Image (cartoon, rainbow, N blue to C red):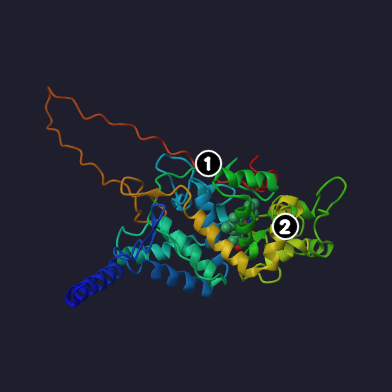
């Protein structure tokens, strides 16, 4: 090849490479992309991270709250931010009101804060479902997990119904076969179940979530014999027996991981092996021969669990996402769906011979919100949804 031609070829290759580097910064994964907002709202991920970091610095309990919020959103009807809705246009009672959520949800204000910053920076660009996925990652990183990429491009759903939870959602009383079945229905494996349950390395549970294990467990034993006796005694000190008029919102909340409750690490698994799993569903992972070996492996290897946890969170983030302009919407406020602007009613001239008016379609009445009374809440958790 002539030297001049060689030079031209090299220049073309160099230009093509630098051009690619300049604009092709997104990796497409199953329709979602890493760097989805790099052109439409380049600061999106930074804004969410800054909000999460400052809120977690002020209150450590925000980090577990955000991770849980993300899981609860994606597990029911996919990652569509349906958990954030205060009301559903159909009149259904929203997921938020379910006994698996209710007052135990933490982090809703953090999502609102991130959304309002993003709306002033790039209005109607960044979906609430993506904010939730970024925020869960940032919360996990703030709690000690190495950073991981989060794909984006999810759109927000337009419905939310608490009736979607019963029979589809794990509850503290479930054992491995039922948990595995529920995860499997959502495209998640038994390994995902064990890996993701490690989120219980941070945060805690209210006493009524596990009090069946420390009071009146069975006819033969007042305390669940699977629990380490010293741990059970400590739990009984921290959680006095319930009284009928106790307000569940004021129930004490106990850390899942008594060793390093603020750090997202593998000590959760070591605690399970030491018979200090707080919920029946935690303890079940170590009792069941199908999952015990995984618990042992994660207890030995923090780096392995960190890697698996990041991968499983990425997988959760792809559950039933709404993709593309035709699906869902980008909400203006995460708690409400965007309503179409009110239709202008044509002004019909008053005319004695022309009494016709455009038909009025009755609006479907909104079902009244059933706030769960104390005992519905508690009993729902003990029995499981079924
Ligand atoms: C496997 C079945 C699971 C069950 C039965 C379960 C149940 C629970 C319960 C009852 C609580 C306590 C809520 C409270 O009292 O405020 C809780 C807290 C929590 N859950 Fe789960 N969970 C499960 C899986 C998961 C998964 C997969 C994740 C995340 C990937 C997760 C993340 C969390 C976090 C971070 C907390 C602490 C929240 C806080 O302190 O505010 N859980 N979970």
Tell which tag, 1 or 2, sits nearer the viewer: 2
Residue pointed to by mark 1: 164
Q: Position of residue 139 (x, y in %)?
A: 52, 67
The quarter of the rendered structure image containing the N terminus is bottom left
Q: CA distance from mark 1 to mark 2?
A: 33 Å
Residue under the image location 48 percent in, 40 percent down: 368
Q: Position of residue 337 (x, y in %)?
A: 37, 49
Q: Earlier in the sequence, mark 1 or mark 2?
A: 1
Q: Residue furthest top?
A: 353
Q: Is residue 257 left or right of residue 339?
A: right
Residue 174 seen from this side = no
Element type where label 2 sits in the image: helix
Q: Position of residue 50 (x, y in %)?
A: 43, 72
The quarter of the rendered structure image containing the C terminus is top right
Contact, mark 1 vs mark 2 (Cβ under 8 Å): no
Question: As rendered, which of 124 and 198 lies closer to the eye?
Answer: 198
Question: As rendered, which of 381 and 279 lies closer to the eye?
Answer: 279
In this picture, is 374 found above or below 260? above
């Amino acid at each position: 090849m002539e030297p001049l031609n060689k030079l031209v070829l090299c220049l073309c290759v160099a230009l093509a490479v630098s051009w690619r580097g300049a604009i092709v910064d997104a990796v497409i994964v199953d329709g979602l992309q890493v760097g989805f907002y790099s052109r439409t709202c380049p600061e999106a991920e930074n804004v969410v991270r800054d909000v999460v970091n400052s809120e977690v610095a002020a209150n450590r309990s925000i980090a577990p709250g955000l991770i849980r919020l993300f899981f609860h959103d994606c597990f029911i009807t996919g990652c569509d931010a349906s958990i954030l809705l205060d009301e559903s246009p159909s009149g259904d009672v929203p997921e938020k009101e379910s006994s698996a959520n209710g007052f135990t949800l933490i982090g809703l204000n953090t999502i609102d804060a991130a959304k309002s910053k993003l709306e002033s920076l790039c209005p109607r660009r960044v979906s609430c479902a993506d904010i939730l996925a970024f925020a869960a990652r940032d919360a996990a990183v703030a709690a000690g997990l190495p950073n991981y990429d989060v794909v984006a491009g999810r759109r927000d759903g337009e419905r939310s119904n608490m009736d979607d939870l019963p029979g589809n959602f794990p509850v503290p009383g479930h054992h491995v076969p039922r948990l595995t079945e529920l995860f499997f229905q959502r495209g998640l494996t038994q390994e995902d179940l064990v890996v993701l349950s490690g989120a219980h390395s941070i945060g805690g549970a209210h006493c009524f979530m596990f009090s069946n294990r420390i009071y009146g467990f069975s006819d033969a034993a007042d305390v669940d014999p699977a629990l380490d006796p010293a741990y059970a005694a400590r739990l009984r000190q921290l959680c006095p027996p319930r009284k009928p008029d106790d307000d569940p919102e004021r129930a004490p909340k106990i850390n899942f991981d008594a060793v390093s409750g603020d750090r997202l690490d593998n000590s959760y698994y070591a605690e399970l092996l030491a018979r200090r799993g707080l919920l029946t569903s935690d303890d079940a992972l170590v009792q069941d021969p199908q999952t015990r070996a995984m618990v042992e492996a994660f207890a030995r290897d923090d780096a392995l669990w960190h890697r698996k946890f990041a991968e499983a969170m990425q997988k959760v983030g792809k559950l039933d996402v709404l993709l593309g302009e035709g699906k869902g919407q980008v909400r203006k406020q995460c708690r409400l769906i965007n309503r179409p602007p009110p239709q202008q009613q044509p002004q019909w001239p008053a005319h004695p011979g022309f009494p016709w008016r455009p038909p009025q379609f009755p609006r479907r009445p909104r079902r009244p919100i059933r706030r769960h009374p104390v005992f519905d809440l508690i009993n729902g958790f003990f029995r499981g949804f079924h």
